Image (cartoon, rainbow, N blue to C red):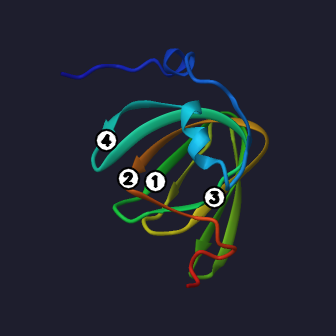
Amino acid sequence: MVTPVNIKQALADCPFFKGRTSENGDAAATAFARLGAINNGQIFAGSYQGYTEWERHGNGDELVQVIDGMTEITILTDDGPETHELTAGSFIVVPQGLWHRFNTPDGVTVMTATPMPTDHSNAEDPRIG
């Protein structure tokens, strides 16, 4: 059965997570709604302010779409770090296996199609060691 999802309605029960840091990422999970499954992962939507720990996905690319607000994403590529500003209506595809993190000083609402599982790191450069 195919079922449409109302993102606004799904987010209505999720609190805005203010003050996200690389150390409290587990607490941020309450700000995200699980919207459904896709291929080898999940579709999530949530709203937060702050910055995330490094993450990567070994089983596929991740799609990140900004619904409202702004965030900066830094992706560690073979050519060095790339930082991109994402605003409402924009999206980015993070290639499989690349470490990335978000800096969101004022708040953002995002929807992601995230391959599972996700690796996390608080290292300055998670590619080392």
Q: Which residue is mark 4?
A: 38
Q: Are marks 4 and 3 in contact (CB under 8 Å)?
A: no
For the residues labelled 4 and 2, the Cα–Cα distance comes to: 8 Å
Q: Is residue 29 left or right of residue 125?
A: left
Decide which of 26, 66 is in the foreground and name it: 26
Seen as rendered, the residue at the extreme right is 106
- Which label's residue is closer to the chain start, 4 or 3? 4
Q: Residue at x 64, y 66 (%)?
A: 122
Q: Position of residue 109 (x, y in %)?
A: 64, 33
- Residue type, numbered disc 1: Glu
Q: Which residue is mark 1?
A: 62
- The circle drawn on residue 53 is 3
- Which label's residue is closer to the chain start, 2 or 3? 3
Q: Position of residue 50 (x, y in %)?
A: 75, 45
Q: Are marks 2 and 1 in contact (CB under 8 Å)?
A: yes
What is the quadrant of residue 54 in the picture? bottom right
- Residue type, numbered disc 4: Ile
